[in-house]
Image (spheres, grey):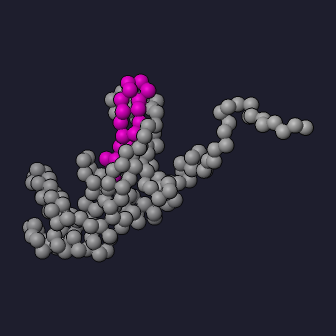
Amino acid sequence: MPNKKIKPPHPIREPIQFKLYDFYEEFSDFRSDVSKKLIGCQDMSPNLIRLEKNGEIIFNNNIAVCPVCGSKHNIKGDKIERELIFMDLGTQICKIQRYKCSKCNNIFNTDLSSLVEVNKKITKPVIDFIIKSYNISGDSICNDSIRKIRYMLKEIYNVDISYQSIENILVDFENELKEDF
């Protein structure tokens, strides 16, 4: 028999190595609620999926819904990078999945509103810790309590935030309290 190179019957079949999480995203998802609590993501929306692939944190939607037309027919696009500050992890660069709507051609990102405020990088668990620590330490904003809060965050939870960021969070909290009354 002569040596001949035989091509596969379909040109689509190429020798590509796949990993199990390429087919089932659940395999790279959180294993339990305990791991969510360790990182401070226990209050995430059930539609938000946090994946870890090759040491990178990736956020996807379980079901991507277009915010303009409400369509569920969307195409995954590229991923954008965003810096977020987590409890126990500190500052991490995360990748956020982008989508394109098939009906209205709107491009939108994964909704992170259950994890972080709009245009902010400090996650809600860190903000909650700052507010709880502030309520325990004193009633008025003073440099001493801000320094204590920053020291606790840095030493215990590996979170490095500036004094000004902590003060801005506390001022916003006090303004929200005044608006409620």
* In front of the other: 48 or 53: 53
Q: Is residue 77 left or right of residue 111?
A: right
- Magenta stretch contains residue 126: no
**Which SS does the magenta portion mostly show?**
loop
Image quarter hosting the N terminus: top right
Q: Residue at x 20, y 65 (%)?
A: 162
Point out residue 60 in the picture as x, y percentages from the top left corner: 43, 45
Q: Is residue 58 visible?
A: yes
Q: Is residue 43 placed above or below 140 in the rendered structure?
A: above
Q: Is residue 41 left or right of residue 130?
A: right
Q: Residue at x 52, y 59 (%)?
A: 31
Point out residue 62 in the picture as x, y percentages from the top left corner: 46, 43
Q: Is residue 135 visible?
A: no
Point out residue 47 in the picture as x, y percentages from the top left corner: 42, 45
* In front of the other: 150 or 127: 150
* In front of the other: 37 or 156: 156
Q: How many marks?
A: 0
Q: Is residue 31 placed above or below 97 in the rendered structure?
A: below
Q: Is residue 58 left or right of residue 5?
A: left
* In front of the other: 101 or 125: 101
| Residue 61, picture quadrant | top left
Task: Report the span colored magenta.
Answer: 98-115
- Magenta stretch contains residue 114: yes
| Residue 56, picture quadrant | bottom left
Q: Is residue 69 placed above or below 64 in the rendered structure?
A: above
Q: Residue furthest right?
A: 1
Q: Residue at x 32, y 54 (%)?
A: 83
Point out residue 110 in the picture as x, y percentages from the top left corner: 38, 42
Q: Residue at x 41, y 36 (%)?
A: 99
Q: Is residue 180 left or right of residue 92?
A: left
